[in-house]
Amino acid sequence: MVLITHYPWYRLVDYKLVLVLTRSYFSQGTNGKLVCDGQFICKTIELPWKENQKGISCIPEGYYLLRKRYSQKFQWHIEVVAVKNRSFILLHPANNAMNELNGCIAPVTKHSGAGLGLQSRQAFSLIKKLVYTALEQSAVVSLIVQS
């Protein structure tokens, strides 16, 4: 059982879902592999690492919480919470990190180059279902980003 204290209220949580994103860095983008409980979920693409600069860099490696978020542009998607010096870091569909991302993470089915991928909407659908199902069961859902 885990006591969560970073919400406006305290609650006990029995269920945790931990996603692990393992990255490879390239000058034109960052490619990753996302797993949960040792099971492969999908690949990811991000901007290259540029010292966490807003809009041009992927986020720092670390531990983050995930939550549901809605916007008109992306509809229902996933937000990476409390990224240092950054806001609105999302998991959403995109196939070209340099053209479609501003620091967010895009799930893809297959890498097609550094920061490039294929069938992002299909991969995002898998992650969204996994994360939303856990959140609906009052789980704490987290993301570990590592190299």
Image: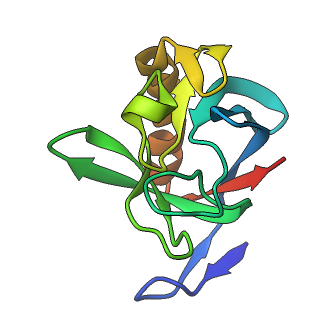
Q: Position of residue 11 (x, y in %)?
A: 53, 81
| Residue 86 point in image, percent of width and height | 47, 69
**Image: 85 above or below 42:** below
Front-lying residue, 30 or 34? 30
Quadrant in the rendering for residue 42: top right
Q: Position of residue 74 (x, y in %)?
A: 26, 38
Quadrant (top left, top right, bottom left, bottom right) of the N terminus: bottom right
Give the residue drawn at x 57%, y 87%.
5
| Percent position of residue 49, x then y | 67, 51
Q: Is residue 61 left or right of residue 77?
A: right
In this rendering, position of residue 62 left or right of residue 140? right
Question: Taking 133 as reference, is 116 above or below it?
Answer: above
Q: Is residue 54 visible?
A: yes
Nearest to the observer: residue 130 or residue 72:
72
What residue appears at the point 47 percent right and 19 percent down from the top-left corner? 120
| Quadrant of residue 39 within the rendered picture | top right
User: What residue is shown at x 52% (from left), y 72% (from top)?
Assistant: 82
- Which residue extends farthest left? 72
